[in-house]
Amino acid sequence: MVFRFVSIILSAVLISGCFQGDPMIIKEPVELKVPVQVKPDPPEELIKPFVFTMPVFYYPDEKGVTSALKRDDEINIKIMINELIGRDNAWRAWATEKEVTDARKNH
């Protein structure tokens, strides 16, 4: 009973969609201006490439090696990790800033 009622209503709605009349034809293009928010360019210090002395990994039995790295390489990898964490924190701080501008004002 309910199925028949729903199918009749659904059929009526679908059939009524077929009798919409003639479509409206627009002969001239219409320009729509939509405000788009854009973040400003990131600061130069976030974009500059990393320059690191890459650590060299050694066989664990080699003389002077701890954790597959020599002392200088351990220091280099700690510096690299600290700078990467700092860069990540700076990117996160920049990305969560409230300063967002309207694209039409910039261009």
Image: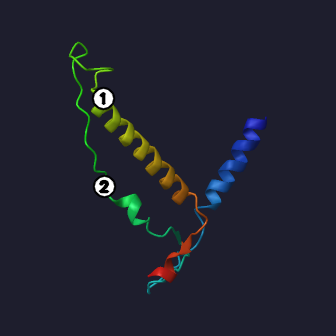
Task: Give the x, y percent position of residue 9.
Answer: 72, 49
Residue 105 badge: none
Visual colour scheme: rainbow
Residue type, mark 2 in image: Pro
Foreground residue, 38 or 67? 67
In the picture shown, does residue 22 fall above or below 74?
below
Residue 49 badge: 2
Quarter placement of the C terminus: bottom left
Task: Give the x, y percent position of residue 58.
Answer: 22, 22
Q: Residue at x 40, y 39 (%)?
A: 81
Foreground residue, 31 or 16? 31
Quarter placement of the N terminus: top right
Task: Give the x, y percent position of residue 20.
Answer: 60, 69
At numbered mark 1, what does the secondary structure look like: helix, strand or loop?
helix
Give left or right: position of 92 versus 83.
right
Give left or right: position of 71 versus 99.
left
Extreme residue in the bottom direction? 28
Extreme residue in the right direction? 1
Residue type, mark 1 in image: Arg
In the picture shown, does residue 40 fall above or below 28?
above
Q: Residues within 10 Å of mark 2 (few under 14, many from 20)?
A: few
Q: Residues within 10 Å of mark 1 (few under 14, many from 20)?
A: few
Residue 25 visible at all: no
The residue that disc 1 covers is 71
Foreground residue, 77 or 92? 77
At numbered mark 2, what does the secondary structure look like: helix, strand or loop?
loop
Q: Residue at x 30, y 29 (%)?
A: 71
